[in-house]
Image (cartoon, rainbow, N blue to C red):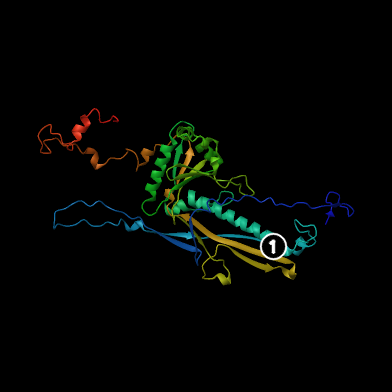
Amino acid sequence: MPIINPETGTAHDYATLTDAFRRLPYVPQQINALPWNAQGVATRTLLVDTRTETFDLVDPRAWNSGMSQVDLGDAEDDQSVPLKVLHYPHGFTVRASEVSEQRAFGSESEIETTADRLAREMATWQTSIDFTWEFTRIGAALFGVILGRYGKVYVDLRKTFKRQPLRLKFNFGSGENFFEFLNGAKYLARQRLGGSYNVAGFQLLGDYAMNQKVIYDPSVQNTYAGFQERQFMRADNSKGFTICDEVEVKLYRNQFIPRTNQLAFPTTVLALIPNAPNLFQSRFAPAQVMGGVNTAGAPVYLFPKDLDFNEGVQVKGQTNIISWNQRLEGIVLIEHGPTTDLAALGFYGESASSPFDTLDDLTDADLGLAPGTNIMPRGLTEALSDEQADEVA
């Protein structure tokens, strides 16, 4: 059925509604998709016990002699870290006057109902909560801070747990070997994670600018060309690809923070993220209402209230969440710049010595053999001296 033409606004001029569509905003969910261990708790204050375990090398002793004692480390290594659950209230109000006499979206003949308007408000509310979780978890999981819209630090988890991510630099485009660097960064991440987690690979996550630096780095392009996989250079690799063993490169599809000119994910850093169960933690506290006292918190809460004289309804919603990374030091952040000397960081390369470095070979006399005795396995000497051994018959 035709409706009044909004161009003219007269009751004698009609138009036909032929299409209706919504412009839905993109809301990032890639950090929310990590394997979060999310649970409800009954209090707004949490305690996280941390303990630094140790081990030793046991030297041999004479039989029936004393023994070395197990050293568990200093008792001061044990910490009971307090965390405060953050409160994120967010709601909406629907008034009868806002719905009255409004044509339903996408319909020529139906009138908008209060249920339609409430459903629309609810969808926007849930999307806002999803983005809030994503933004706070970016900070908690990768950078060790929980920030507000304009950069205010609400929780500095680096100070809380006395750990921080490992920050490295690689000179993209310089011709240096990114595969060697990335394998070294992965090795360092495993060393810093210790023995507590079963790491099933890594993802290298970055915004478009950093993602492209990886894809079009000469060492990456030349490697794929050398393996005759030239389709790699024609494909849309922003969809994700395995760059080396256990490491998948992924594009973080970014979004602006509403009412700011800043993006949710930084554009100057790649995050090497371990895929490990229970590494990322979230806790939800209960709403401070009579029905929520001493109950386990839920991810979200909604409480409706009728306005005076039945003029509308106000809905107060909230999510009460705190997130953290159990081993923040296992995150590696890679920026563009002069390449970091990984060997100088320890656990890697030739920067540290070993007791075996000073071990000299024994002479024939030390071994109790006649000088010049050939101690190769029987028959190996003949094989090595056979000039035809490498030739194909």
The residue lying at 39 percent from left, 50 percent from top is 193
Quarter of the image for residue 344 reads: top left
User: How many numbered marks appear?
Assistant: 1
Please give left or right for residue 360 compared with residue 123 in the image. Answer: left
What residue type is disc 1 on?
A: Leu
Residue 323 seen in the current view: yes
- The one nearer the camera, 61 or 186, is 186
The residue lying at 41 percent from left, 37 percent from top is 180
Judged from this view, the residue extending furthest toward the front is 393
The residue lying at 55 percent from left, 53 percent from top is 134
Question: Compared to 257, does 181 lie above or below?
Answer: above
Q: Where the N terminus falls, by quadrant?
A: bottom right
- The one nearer the camera, 303 or 227, is 227
Please give left or right for residue 242 compared with residue 64 in the image. Answer: right
Residue 15 point in image, percent of width and height: 83, 51
Disc 1 crowd, CA 10 A, few/some/many (<14, 14-19, 20+): some
Question: Compared to 133, does 304 lie above or below?
Answer: below
Judged from this view, the residue extending furthest toward the right is 12
Residue 51 point in image, percent of width and height: 37, 57
Residue 308 point in image, percent of width and height: 73, 69
Q: Where the C terminus falls, by quadrant?
A: top left
Residue 267 seen in the current view: no
Residue receiving disc 1: 118
Quarter of the image for residue 377 reads: top left
- The one nearer the camera, 150 or 381, is 381
Residue 328 point in image, percent of width and height: 44, 50
Judged from this view, the residue extending furthest toward the top is 387
